[in-house]
Amino acid sequence: MTRPRDRRVIQALSLGLTNAQIASLLLVSEGTVKAQLAKIMEPLGFSNRVQLAVLAVQAGLLEESRTTMPLDVGRLHHAAPRA
């Protein structure tokens, strides 16, 4: 069973949000998001976020996100590209 915060991170990831956008949405640092994703993926044996997003879609977590994610998720500004 996933914790509510883990579930929100996975849902946001599956919606295509960047770590910076997820951090902004959840009011945490980008480093916290990275650490949380690593903590979620490690026991699953996943090496990248795409594997986690695919699992989330297959498990129906995106359907659940329609009721748990704020309506303005699409309005989050895009993070500036890194040099």
Image: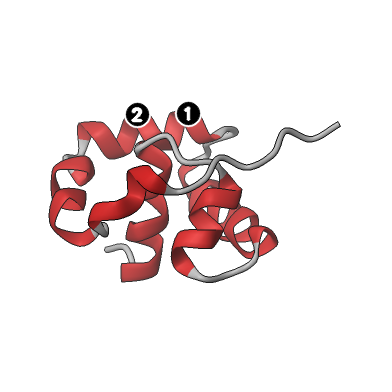
Between 40 and 20, the residue placed more toward the observer is 20
Confirm whether residue 11 shows in the render.
no
> Residue 79 appears at what percent x and percent y?
63, 42
Q: Which mark is residue 35?
A: none
Between 3 and 74, the residue placed more toward the observer is 74
Asked if 37 appears above or below 60 in the picture, the reply is: below
- Does residue 43 appear left or right of residue 35 in this picture? left
> Residue 5 appears at what percent x and percent y?
38, 68
Label 1 neighbourhood size at 10 Å, few (<14), some (14-19), many (20+)?
Answer: few
Asked if 75 appears above or below 55 in the picture, the reply is: below
Residue 6: name its quadrant: bottom left
Q: Which mark is residue 54?
A: 2
Residue occupying the point 64% across, 66% down: 29
Asked if 37 appears above or below 51 in the picture, the reply is: below
- Does residue 36 appear left or right of residue 67 in this picture? right
**Amino acid type, residue under disc 1 in the picture:** Val
Residue occupying the point 26% across, 59% down: 70
Q: Secondary structure at mark 1?
A: helix
Residue occupying the point 22% across, 41% down: 62
The colour scheme used here is secondary structure
Q: Which mark is residue 50?
A: 1
- Does residue 71 appear left or right of residue 46 in this picture? left
Asked if 81 appears above or below 64 in the picture, the reply is: above
Residue 56: name its quadrant: top left
**Amino acid type, residue under disc 2 in the picture:** Val
Pointer 2 with pointer 1, Cβ within 8 A:
yes
Q: Secondary structure at mark 2?
A: helix
> Residue 10 appears at what percent x and percent y?
38, 49
